[in-house]
């Protein structure tokens, strides 16, 4: 008799857990898409405000100083986006 009562409760708890997992997966997907869009916009703005072509300087001229600065900006923007998603 005890087992008959416990079985529906376990099924209800499993369904609730799956629903919660689905909500969290949807939120993670949404935040990932928003983060990638914001990151892309930041890179476009960075490319527009510099007086030179970042792609040309890094790719063709092999300018390591520009690559280092751009990588620092990329890491900084990524940390800000991650903190806003978590927070």
Image (cartoon, rainbow, N blue to C red):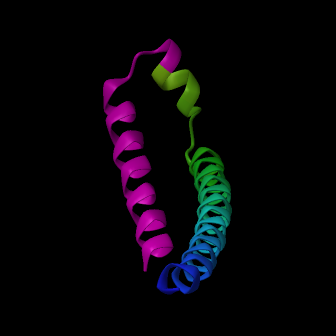
Tell me if residue 6 comes above or below residue 42 in the rendering. Answer: below
Left or right of residue 27: residue 81: left
Left or right of residue 80: residue 60: right
- Residue found farthest to the top: 60
- Residue found farthest to the front: 1
Counting from the top left corner in percent of width and height, residue 6 is at: 52, 82
- At x 56%, y 22%, the residue is 56
Quarter of the figure with the C terminus: bottom left
Counting from the top left corner in percent of width and height, residue 10 is at: 54, 76
Left or right of residue 45: residue 62: left
- Magenta highlight on residue 78: yes
Tell me if residue 31 comes above or below residue 73 in the rendering. Answer: below
- Magenta highlight on residue 77: yes
Which of 17/61 is in front?
17
Tell me if residue 72 comes above or below residue 87 in the rendering. Answer: above
How many labels were placed on the picture?
0
Which of 28/56 is in front?
28
- At x 58%, y 81%, the residue is 4
Residue numbers of the magenta segment = 59-87
Q: Quadrant of residue 54?
A: top right
Q: Main secondary structure of the magenta part?
A: helix
Counting from the top left corner in percent of width and height, residue 62 is at: 40, 16
Which of 39/17 is in front?
17
């Amino acid at each position: 008799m005890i087992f008959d009562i416990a079985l529906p409760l376990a099924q209800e708890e499993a369904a609730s857990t799956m629903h919660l997992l689905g909500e969290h997966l949807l939120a993670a997907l949404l935040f990932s898409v928003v983060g990638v869009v914001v990151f892309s916009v930041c890179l476009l703005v960075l490319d527009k405000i510099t007086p030179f072509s970042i792609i040309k300087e890094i790719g063709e001229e092999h300018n390591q100083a520009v690559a280092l600065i751009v990588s620092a900006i990329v890491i900084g923007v990524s940390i800000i986006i991650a903190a806003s998603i978590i927070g």
